[in-house]
Structure formats: structure tokens, C-alpha cells
Amino acid sequence: MDLIDIGANLGHESFDHDLDAVLARARAAGVNRLVVTGASRAGSVRALELAKAHPGMLWATAGVHPHHAVECTAEAIAELRALQAEPEVVAGGECGLDYHRDFSPRPAQRTAFERQLELATETGLPLFLHQRDAHGDFMAIMREFEGRLGPVVVHCFTGTREECYDYLDRDWHIGITGWLCDERRGRHLREFVKDIPAHRLMIETDAPYLLPRTVRPMPSHRRNEPMYLAHIVEELARDRGEPVEVTAAAATATAATFFSL
Ligand SMILES: [Zn+2]
């Protein structure tokens, strides 16, 4: 298999001591290309640094996650603009709304999201978006920018069938993680992932978060790694009623086109 992990938080400190081994294990599992998520000002700088250090294997996004919305000042937007001009930065984001955790006040989240979408209208870059428990406001803000944005992926999709259809109706892409493998929270996804057209479907680990609960043997450290993308695509293919090679090849082609890798 030849897989692309479109969302890996490899700048996370849990990878500091063994990133080369993590990347070697990813390659051995067929995960040959990865997009490192930039989710804060410092994290976006770090993601670019990693991409520059691993040309042809790692690329980066640059953005401010809603958890960090308060740091998304005008100065931060200027920093993101510079980062997004670098050839290794293939998408704006991670940005969006997260009303599940509410780590930042909601008005600050909405402002940070709007500022980053405004930047995206300038750059034309694809957008790597996050939405959790905020579908209504998310759609309302996206409507303000209708017709002015490049391609969009709503990453780590965890929402309802209706939310999924809303995104597909707008020709956005859906990122599926190991959330699918969570029998407590992800069971509903298994019912409708087969409805996502192949050219709108991408896969990701969101490592080090979201270790798929169906991985065997379960690693004792509980850290998710890009190599487990091979497991996620197997589970996804089963739910779609396709051979894993078909799902894998389509997701890879979709991601390579979306991010121009
Ligand atoms: Zn996210």
C-alpha cells in the first residue's frame, strides 16, 4: 500500500525523542507521505521545520486551532501569511470551531476562524478545518466566504450523517481517523462512510491522539503513530464494502491531488 496521512501532529513533544523511528515504521507500513498539522503559532513553525527536514515525505499546514484562538492576533495572521508562502506548506489551518472543549471563548474562536478564512481568500491554499459540536456556527461562517475559498477538508470528521451530507453538498472533503474504530463514540460513522464519494475521502491518524481502539496488540504507551493508518484504512474499507487496496488507492489519489503532493 501507498498511503498519505493527511493529519499527523508530529511536532508534538511525544515524538521529540524518536521521530526518525516513527517515520521508519510509517514507511514500513506504507505511509510514505504525511502532512504535519500546524495548530498554533509555534506549532506551525515547528511543522514547517519538520517538513523542510524531510523533503518528499513530510509537508505542513500552518494555522491556529480553536483551542488556541486567543493567540490568533493580527500579528499571528502576518506570521501565518509568511509561513503559507513557503513551498512545504500545503494548506491553511488547522482552524475552525470547537465547542466541545471550549478551551477558548467562543467569540474568540469565531474571530480566529474568520481571520484565517480571510487569509485563505488571499492565498488560495486548500483549507484543513476542524469542527466539533459547532456545526451551525461553522456553516454560517463558511457561508460568508462562499465562492472565495480553495478546496476544503473537514478533518477528523466525528459528526452526524446530516453534517457529513452538508459538507459533501458543498463539495468539501472528509477526513476519517481512528475515531471510526471507537466502539463508544464512532459507531455511527460506520453506517455512512460508504456514502462518501472516493474523490472526497481522505484518511489520517491525528497522531499522537486517537489511537484506534481496535489496534492489536494495543501498544502500552497509548501513543498513536502514523503507521496505524494502515489499520484505519482496513477498517474503513470493510465499512465501505471495498477491498482495502481500492479504498487506499483512492484516498491516496484524492489527498495527492488535494494538497498537490
Ligand atoms: Zn482537529
Image (cartoon, rainbow, N blue to C red):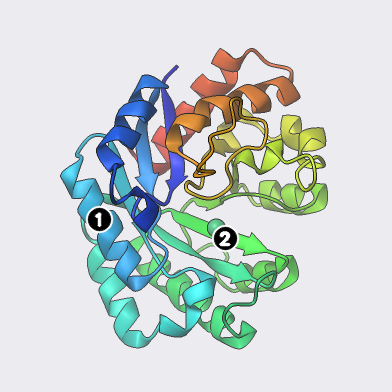
Question: Where residue 143 sits: x, y (%)?
Answer: 63, 69
- Crowding around mark 1 (Cα neighbors within 10 Å: few <14, some 14 to 19, many 20+) is many
The residue labelled by disc 1 is 48
For ligand 1, give the image quadrant.
bottom right
Position above or below: 61 against 133:
above
The answer to whether mark 2 is within 8 Å of ligand 1 is yes
- The disc labelled 2 sits on which kind of residue? His
Question: Going 58% across and 80% down the picture, which residue do you hit?
Answer: 110
User: x and y percent of residue 26 in the render?
Assistant: 38, 29
Q: Where 247 falls versus 112 (above or below)?
A: above
Instruction: Name which residue type carries label 1.
Output: Leu
Task: Indicate which disc residue 130 carries.
Answer: 2
The residue closer to the viewer here, 43 or 157, is 43
Residue 169 % position (x, y): 70, 48
Q: Residues within 10 Å of mark 2 (few under 14, many from 20)?
A: many
In the picture provided, is 97 more to the left or to the right than 20? Answer: right
Does 138 sit left or right of 203 as displayed?
right
Q: Identify whether 106 is placed above or below 220.
A: below
**Residue 58 appears in which quarter of the rendering?**
top left
Secondary-structure class at tag 1: helix
